Amino acid sequence: MVGTLYGLGVGPGDPELITVKAFRKLKESPVIAYPKKQKGSKSYAHRIIDVYFQPNEKEMLGLVFPMTKDPATLERKWTETVENVWEKLQEGKDVAFVTEGDPLLYSTFIHMMRLMQEKYPQVPIEVVPGISSINGAASRLGIPLADGDEHVAIVPARDDYETMKKVIQDNDCVIFIKVAKVIDLMLQVLRDLDLLDKASVVTKVTSNEEIIWRADELEGAELEYLTLMVVRK
């Protein structure tokens, strides 16, 4: 029997924001796979679930995901990653792959799932949805994302002034993820639209490392990767 691969969303940061089903699958699965940093330190998703296990209670499978755009390197590293998971699955062990937020919303699990389906179509795959950082931010900031017939957009922020401006103009609310590297450009867009007071920025939302930023603190700021911006007109 081949084990089942579970994609488990473990929420935006607060360990209590994990679903009952995801918690049960974590407890039942003998192997927990998690994104691992190159230097071996615990990933964000790993730290979220850490409170639920004693050391050595589970077989922990750390997976390094390459931070590169080189196609050859990406293919090689991803193949290694899928093979590492397959090695456990073919032993009949269920593998719970944990990811912060939701497994099917801008998650590393999406590519894992596609490659596993392509290389080993016999592997059963189940996804357990999770609370995303977007929902977490709305809750912590007290900002309704959409009401009635309003339009809401989720957009990866990028270094493109006109596109970022148009997205804001075309929607009632926009959640910009991956905003850290282009924060100065985003601030300029908001100033030009006279919407600076309508923007909220939060890092590692709901976690014990959460930071909610004021607009006047952001110019030239060095923000962590897990930072998003909510613009609510």
Image: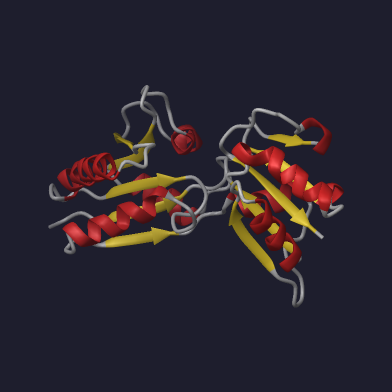
Name which quarter of the figure residue 54 lies in: top left
Q: Give the side of residue 153 with respect to residue 5, left or right.
A: right
Residue at 24% across, 56% down: 116
Looking at the image, can residue 204 be seen?
Answer: no
Of residues 15 and 197, the one drawn nearer to the viewer in this rendering = 197
How far across and down, in percent of the image, does residue 34 sit? 36, 39
Residue farthest toward the bottom in the current orientation of the protein: 149
Residue at 49% across, 35% down: 44
Q: Give the side of residue 7 with respect to residue 123, left or right.
A: right
Looking at the image, can residue 68 be seen?
Answer: yes
Q: Quadrant of the C terminus?
A: bottom right
Of residues 88 and 44, the one drawn nearer to the viewer in this rendering = 44
Q: How many marks?
A: 0
Q: Is residue 166 shown above or below 157?
A: below
Of residues 53 and 113, the one drawn nearer to the viewer in this rendering = 113
Q: Quadrant of the N terminus?
A: bottom left
User: What colouring style does the render use?
Assistant: secondary structure
Q: Is residue 182 shown above or below 6?
A: above
How far across and down, in percent of the image, does residue 191 sit? 83, 47
How far across and down, in percent of the image, does residue 69 sit? 36, 42
Residue at 71% across, 38% down: 184
How far across and down, in percent of the image, does residue 186 sit? 71, 45
